[in-house]
Image (cartoon, rainbow, N blue to C red):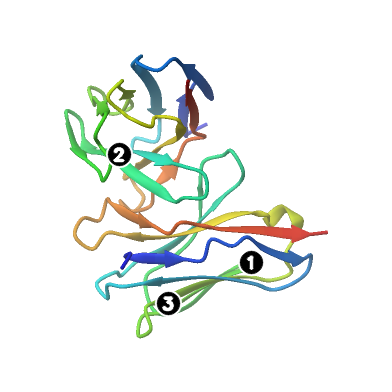
């Protein structure tokens, strides 16, 4: 089955620790994205990558870092500098034979930092 | 002013009702319009998209765009409890096709 996988589904960390969220896609999509969703709010773009070894900051990149070493993978690191990291994190991808702007989402990772 | 405005709801209607979900946008440069459905604790899924003014129908769902008013709508006919979800309008950025401006989402509940 083609799709986007995110792991783990739930993640718990202590304050001050860095944590890396995994995102893998087998859709042969060029572009990948990371969003954050807080209760009752829409999606806010953290980082996106349109091609391997290149990525751009989104609207709320502070306290986050990414890498794009492979087309299939786009991991997100939530650093200790992120002041309010508890949220639902969504990875998406677009491109391939579909329209670039049609983004397909993974199931999400719910991060809780205490 | 936000680029995309969407009433957060919640909206609760009885099963079988016609549901109308709406968004307004501020920039006439937006050309492509999408609707995503998000079930609780899941990732959004692309429901419908349309490129131009007018209506596009897919089963019980109809997407409508009025570019003159900068107003987009999603209608659900014969609503079912399984339609209970949050619906987000989404507009690809006019300066970069790969960035999408999402509405904040309307939470919909269909009462059996």
Q: Residue furthest right?
A: B112
Q: Which mark is residue B59?
A: 1
Q: Where does label 2 land, which residue?
A: A46
| Element carrying mark 2 | strand
Q: Nearer the viewer, residue B71 or A104?
A: B71
Q: Where does label 3 land, which residue?
A: B71
> Which marked residue is nearer to the observer: mark 3 or mark 1?
3
Is residue B66 found left or right of B61 in the rendered image? left
Is residue B64 found left or right of A35 in the rendered image? right
Residue found at x 74% / y 72%: B17
The subunit letter for the residue under badge 3 reads B
Residue found at x 36% / y 46%: A44
| Element carrying mark 3 | strand
Is residue B12 found left or right of A58 in the rendered image? right
Q: Nearer the viewer, residue B25 or A40?
A: A40
| Element carrying mark 1 | loop
């Amino acid at each position: 089955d083609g799709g986007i996988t995110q792991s783990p589904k739930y993640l718990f960390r202590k304050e001050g620790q860095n944590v890396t969220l995994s995102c893998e896609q087998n859709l042969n999509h060029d572009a990948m994205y990371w969003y954050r969703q807080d209760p009752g709010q829409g999606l806010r773009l953290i980082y996106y990558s349109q091609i391997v070894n290149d990525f751009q900051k989104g609207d709320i990149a502070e306290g986050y870092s990414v890498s794009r070493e492979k087309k299939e993978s786009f991991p997100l690191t939530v650093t200790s500098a992120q002041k309010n990291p508890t949220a639902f994190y969504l990875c998406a991808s677009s491109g391939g034979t579909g329209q670039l702007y049609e983004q397909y989402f993974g199931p999400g990772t719910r991060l809780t930092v205490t | 002013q936000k680029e995309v405005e969407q009433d957060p709801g919640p909206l609760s209607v009885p099963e079988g009702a016609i549901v109308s979900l709406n968004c307004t946008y501020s920039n006439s440069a937006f050309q492509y319009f999408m609707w995503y459905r998000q079930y609780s604790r899941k990732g959004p899924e692309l429901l419908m998209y349309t490129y131009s003014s007018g209506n596009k129908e897919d089963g019980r769902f109809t997407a409508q765009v009025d570019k003159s008013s900068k107003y987009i709508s999603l209608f659900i006919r014969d609503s079912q409890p399984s339609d209970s979800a949050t619906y987000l309008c989404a507009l690809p950025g006019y300066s970069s096709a790969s960035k999408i401006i999402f509405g904040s989402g309307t939470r919909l509940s269909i009462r059996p």
